């Protein structure tokens, strides 16, 4: 994928409408139990858009309504971080989202990713740098971003989903 996202503000372009459609509702993975959730009506989020530790900026700060949630999936049913991310990837593509970042393990920046990522703290969200993947997707109309991190820890899969609905701007 080319670097079509130069910056979230450029990518979104001016928003003329005062109201945006609701952000996509992402159901939890099958067999998941919620460990944390919060809605921040007006906040910023460091959206992962590139591998940490590389030459390009790893995050783009986006503002708006930020919804954060974490789930724990019982791994006894065969769930893996890759299978969880695959389901989200397919559902988001069907909803018009495009990939900004899709990486696993070292390709995401490994330990640098763990240190720099904006994660819900343990025990609600856990991450193993040897067994994780990051998926970041965005769409223009209605504008929004989704950041999903899934990691296998001690046989279970921990999933953090952050959705950002940018606040309306006028030209």
Image (cartoon, grey):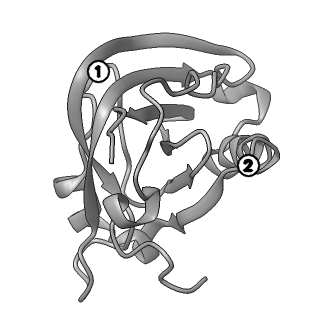
Residue at the (44%, 64%) spot, across then down: 11
The x and y percentages for residue 84 are 68, 40
Nearest the camera: 171 or 80?
171
Relative horizontal placement of residue 116, taking residue 137 as reference (left or right) = left
Q: Is residue 32 above or below residue 2?
A: above
Q: Position of residue 23 (x, y in %)?
A: 55, 27
Q: Does residue 52 appear anywhere in the picture?
A: yes
* Residue located at (50% from left, 33% from top): 159
Vertical position of residue 34 compared to residue 56: above or below = above
Question: Pointer 2: what residue?
Answer: 96
Disc sitting over residue 46 in the figure: none
- Identified at 45% across, 76% down, the residue is 107
What residue is shown at x 77% (from left), y 40% (from top)? Answer: 91
Element at label 2: loop
* Figure check: 160 above or below 53: above
Q: Which residue is mark 1?
A: 123
Inter-mark Cα distance, 1 to 2: 33 Å
Give the side of residue 123 with respect to residue 139, left or right.
Answer: left
Camera-nearest residue between 40 and 88: 40
């Amino acid at each position: 994928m080319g670097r079509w996202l130069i910056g979230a503000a450029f990518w979104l372009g001016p928003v003329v409408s005062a109201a945006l459609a609701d952000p996509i509702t992402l159901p939890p993975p099958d067999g998941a139990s919620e460990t944390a959730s919060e809605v921040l009506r007006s906040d910023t989020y460091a959206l992962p858009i590139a591998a940490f530790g590389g030459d390009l900026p790893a995050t783009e700060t986006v503002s708006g309504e930020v919804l954060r949630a974490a789930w724990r999936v019982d791994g006894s049913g065969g769930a893996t971080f890759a299978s969880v991310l695959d389901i989200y990837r397919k559902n988001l593509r069907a909803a018009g989202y495009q990939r900004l970042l899709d990486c696993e393990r070292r390709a995401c920046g490994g330990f640098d990713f763990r240190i720099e990522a904006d994660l819900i703290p343990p025990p609600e969200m856990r991450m193993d740098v040897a067994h994780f993947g990051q998926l970041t997707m965005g769409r223009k109309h209605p504008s929004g971003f989704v950041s999903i991190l899934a990691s296998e820890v001690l046989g279970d899969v921990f999933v953090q989903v952050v959705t950002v609905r940018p606040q309306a701007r006028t030209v």
